[in-house]
Amino acid sequence: PAQVDSNFDVIVTTSHHVQNTTWIGNQRWDLVVVDEAHDLRNDRTDAHRAVRRLSAHAKFGLTGTPVGISVASFGNLLRIFVPGAVDEDLLAAADGPTSPDRLDAVSRLAEAVRPHMLRRTTELLRDQKLLPRIHHHEILCRLTRRQAALYQGQVNALEDALPRTASQQRFCLVSNSLLRLRQITCHPSLLLARVAIDEEGSGKVQALVALVRRIRAKGEKLIVFTQFAELVPGLARVLTRVFGEPCPTMTGAMGVPARRRFVADFQRDDGPPFVIMTTGVGGCGLTLTQANHVVHFDRPWNPSVERQAEGRAYRIGQRKDVHVHTLVMTGTIDEWIRDVLVHRADLATQLLDTTASGAPISRLSNAQLLDLVRLRAA
């Protein structure tokens, strides 16, 4: 509403409404509580600016992933919920290039924010017997001949283009090339028009079908996550054809009523044995605890997004041990992404902008870059 009677105790609203309602911004609040606070990590969004401008005695942010791909995203949340509590120079130092000074800044940052944070981790929930155990498994896959040829062709094209590319265009060239290489490791159909998604075309699809067969033999359910929305319907058709059972799908295009039906259907004991979702919608508060297997068909650049997706099954209400299966295409960029993510548990370590050695991707030499993406013998 444009205005409400002042005789109220609690107002429940959305960040969109806060952005577009003048009286909310003009009110002095005793307490502001923001659920899904990670949505405010980007200080360039209207939602971030609107919530930050709210006048309140105290503000609380609830999130399972306060850190995005950089310390800067964490700093943006601190400016909303504990303004002035952390020195800006310290935040800048913790977000700088990898060095002993940065590690020291990260340690001091952790000390500075600790009094302002209440944490309830999955480890604590396990200790309190509120969650079962979680197990992580890596499944190594091999490129098909067609995938290998496409992959090598893309590496050759990158090698040819790098010396002829101006510095201001280099980042776009590298980013697009990495995207194409990741697509090839999933299925050639993501790169080639008129190519249907099938088992024969991709080593990952073959590995997925074999994994689903083992899980189905146990009578257990699973969720498959992929970064690529265009891959979702094709994978669903493969599983439906192979196992003779419908495979529901969810992407960001699905509306709220349809999502509720999706969850309700899957949570039934006699509901679908598997579903396929884009990784991004895995962070939308969905409860899918009928599944005790999570499959990462490919991996997001942001490890917190991956953890959020796993949390659809690994959350309070889950009674079985949860198994997380990650498909890795051997000899390809998949292995590099895996190695980078292994070292990304540190609050200060930026994923998208750095390699495992800490050097920004855009500043790697041509030889270093090609060494990262070249096709290796499996």
Image (cartoon, grey):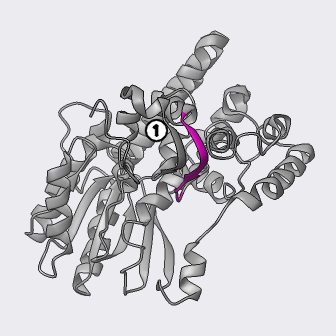
User: Could you say where residue 279 lies in the image, as x and y percent from the top left?
Assistant: 38, 52
* Horizontal relation, residue 102 to residue 306: left or right: right
Q: Secondary structure at mark 1?
A: helix
Q: Quadrant of residue 238?
A: bottom left
Q: Circle 1 sits on which residue?
A: 181
* Horizontal relation, residue 23 to residue 54: left or right: left
Q: Which residue sits furthest bottom?
A: 129
Q: Residue at x 55, y 88 (%)?
A: 128
Q: Residue at x 48, y 48 (%)?
A: 300
Residue density around tag 1, few if under 14, some if 14–19, many if 20 or more, within 10 Å: many
Q: Is residue 178 above or below residue 146?
A: above
Classified by dominant secondary structure, the portion drawn in magenta counts as strand
Q: Which residues are magenta?
A: 54-64
Q: Nearer the viewer, residue 57 or 330?
A: 57
Q: Quadrant of residue 122?
A: bottom right
* Horizontal relation, residue 98 to residue 118: left or right: right
Q: Amino acid at mark 1?
A: Leu
Q: Residue at x 20, y 55 (%)?
A: 259
* Horizontal relation, residue 275 to residue 65: left or right: left
